[in-house]
Image: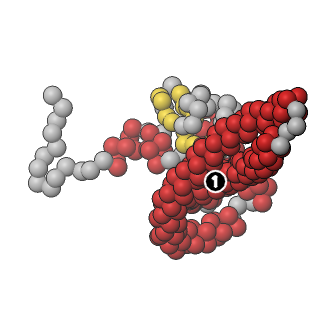
Amino acid sequence: MDVTAKLLRVFQVDKQLRALHSRLGASEKFLAEQSKELTGLDAKRAQHNAQARQLQATASDHEGEMARLDSRMATIRTQMESAQTNKEYKAFLTEMNTHKVERDRLETAALELMGKVDEAKRQVAEMDGERSEREQVKKVATTERGQRFAEIEGRVNELKAERTVAAAEVPADVLTMFQRLLDLRGDEAMASIEVQDRKRHEFTCGSCMMTVPVESVSALMSSGKLTRCVSCQCILYMDEESSKAMQPPAMKRRESPSPVAGRPARKPP
């Protein structure tokens, strides 16, 4: 078996492994998305809780200041009752009105803050409900991911063992080059040669569809020499269809089914 054929065995096993991992990857992606959503909800919930606490603290400060003003205004009323002169009474009245205005402002601000606190708590409650639903979806995603892994685990282990055996037959330098190409191009690391016209020596790369020189095709067919596309640099090989297309017409006729016994072959008109 030539080096291209050995490498093709590795490539085909790798392709099966990627297909299996792709099935698992969809489940893992969905699970990761649910985890990300939960993390985002937790962050928003914590932010709204912190905001509610801060608003509540500010409202409590306003209420404390309102209580202080109420106490001060009660004292002023007592002083007004015992005022000795009109000037003294007016001074107490001015202070009283100032405190009333400030108290009204604080009361309005406190009510607005409490409204915002209620809104923040409402949003937290909504997030709690959304989080509960998202948690259930995550549980389903976790179960699905586990089932997918269980389904492919045995086959993955078989293919990994098969790949180890196949890779051991490929020269180390070739395998290193192939691995770099595989990381870069994935399923297009190798491609079959497409026979466009055998008689005119017209061949193309099955990956990029650019022309492949006839010398490269000849070297590949005669010795299995490692051949790369001059355009996309993928490693070329001859698949069964291309190999049949390269056979001379006489050989193809010899391989075609013989006439049914006892029935003469049809003559061309």
Q: Crowding at label 1, few (<14), some or many (≥20) Cα neighbours within 10 Å?
A: many
Asked whether the viewer can see residue 48, the reply is yes
Please give the count of numbered marks on the rendered protein: 1
As drawn, is 231 to the left or to the right of 29?
right
In this rendering, is residue 200 above or below 62? above
> Which quadrant holds residue 28?
bottom right
Residue 265 image point, x, y percent: 16, 43
Asked whether the viewer can see residue 61, the reply is no
As drawn, is 84 to the left or to the right of 73?
right
In this rendering, is residue 32 above or below 139? above
**Amino acid of disc 1:** Arg
Nearer to the camera, 63 or 181: 63
| Residue closest to the far front | 84
Residue 140 image point, x, y percent: 47, 64
Residue at image position (66%, 34%) is 232
| Residue closest to the far top | 200
Residue 250 image point, x, y percent: 38, 40
State the residue position of label 1. 45
Task: Name the image colouring.
Answer: secondary structure
Residue at image position (59%, 28%) is 210
Image quadrant for the C terminus?
A: top left
Residue 150 image point, x, y percent: 50, 72
Nearer to the camera, 57 or 44: 57
Nearer to the camera, 259 or 212: 212
Residue at image position (19%, 49%) is 259
As drawn, is 73 to the left or to the right of 188?
right
Image quadrant for the N terminus?
A: bottom right
As drawn, is 150 to the left or to the right of 55?
left
Query: SS class of the residue under badge 1?
Result: helix
Residue at image position (70%, 61%) is 170
